[in-house]
Image (spheres, helix red, strand yellow):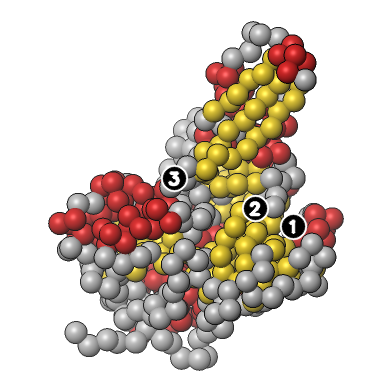
Amino acid sequence: MSVVSSRVPEEAPGILERFLFHAAARPAAPALMVDGESRSWTYSELLAEMERWRGALSTLGVGPGSRVLLILPPCPEFIQSFYALLSLGAMTIPTSPRQTEYELGQLLDHAQPAAVIANADLPPALLDRIERAVSVRAVLFPKERPTGRPDSAGLRRVGLHELAAERQSLRPPPGDAIVTCHYTYKGRGYPLGAPHRYADWCACLDGVDRAFPHELGAAQLLALPMHAAFGLVTVMLPLVQGGRVVVARDHGRIPVLLAEHEICWVGLVPQILRGLLAQASAQLARSFHPGLEVITGGSFLMPSLAGAASELLGREPFQGYGLSETLPVLCNYPGRSRSNSLGAILPRSTAVFAIDETGCPLEPGQAGELAVAGPTVMKAFAGWPHDGSFFLDEGAFRTGDLGYVDHDGFVFFLGRRLPITKVSAQMVDLVEVERLLLTHPSVINARAYIREQDTSEELCASVICKDLSVAASDLRSLLSQYLSRHKVPRRIRITHAQQSKAAA
């Protein structure tokens, strides 16, 4: 089969520019399908949906600089609304629909969005919390709105089909327009917003595109939550390259989808990769695309898991690295890969180096804190300049991760300096866990920590209590009222005050 390049002219360098180029050049080409759904979209049909979203959002008053909370699961409406918001120059705040009311409340109080895009089947507690937010003036539902929830003073609830809005053509925003803000943790006990400009994302996607070039129409699988920065890369890359997007809604179906659709590229986190290995037989793996590229990110890929994947797939997954504050900046990729490393700098991207405690760069092979500088690094945390000054030093972002860069430019991970970790590739702030444990009237002291497993990390906690009546189940129940499941320690070790004194 002859390879047709997906490269676009130099005058169309950005994310939206590249998508619009492919939509104009190949309007009837398949663009998007969702596993389990009969509906699919060509490039022209997907563009029409994005234009419909842009018109609807404009009718609600969304424009340049507007803050919009996007709280959808992986679905076509996420992609369509995100591109419409991108075109409007609005600030999209992508977040998980699986968070708790407490977590969502923290985000709403800080981000102050004027509009929210959410499904009607969002848990009632989350819908209530959204509608109580002082800043929210409109809630837009992709399909029908919840029954029994009439509009109230200052708040409009509306389904997309109810808006008699004309389609609006997509056009790229200015490069300095802040188009996303991801909320993350840095060991402060509360979330911090990492805003990024359109130019940041264009630089990021250009690097990934050059590292993983694909032919026009090549199938790429979306199997990650789309709200995370890595997830958004997997959303945008196929449309930058003129590819065919297949959305997986059931992780158990990933092996079958890889085979059925001849998937050539898929981004996964280690937890999903582990599930893939458990579900895929060697016989099925032989039917995968011969050039299948599996990229992992979100958390460190343990060598044992990488080895098991290599044995099944016949090739090692390409591990990458990035943060909400920097976007993906490192990856192993064809022609430039080294086992157990986080990878090398993506083409035309940025700089990653190790620094000592004073911030001075270290020589190759010397271990220190990893720092990132370049066009994809955010300028400051949203609304928290004091916190930003702690992490940003003359344009370089101090990641809090420990590691070193070898003589060939490959970066290796050694651990974390900050009281944060990843569980199931999702961020956990250990200080937040400890603070909530201390709200229990019997808890005197608490410490959250990580215990290394063969292929993953396990979140644990140790507490000192006043009396003997407290059980670990009581503390887990307390935390579950506030925190998502992945933030609740699987093991809680309880020491009672009297025992602690006797040991001392």
Mark 2 residue element: strand
Label 2 is placed on what type of residue? Arg
Q: Residue at x 35, y 79 (%)?
A: 214
Quadrant containing the C terminus in the rendered view? top right
Mark drawn on residue 454: 3
In percent of width and height, residue 335 lies at 40, 81
Q: CA distance from mark 2 to mark 1?
A: 23 Å
Disc nearer the start of the sequence (1/3): 1
In percent of width and height, residue 495 lies at 67, 18
Q: Which residue is mark 2?
A: 416
Q: Nearer the viewer, residue 82 or 48?
A: 82
Q: Is residue 364 left or right of residue 210?
A: right
Q: Residue at x 58, y 40 (%)?
A: 450
Image height of 434 relative to 408, above or below: above
Q: Is residue 407 left or right of residue 107?
A: left
Q: Quadrant of residue 243?
A: bottom left
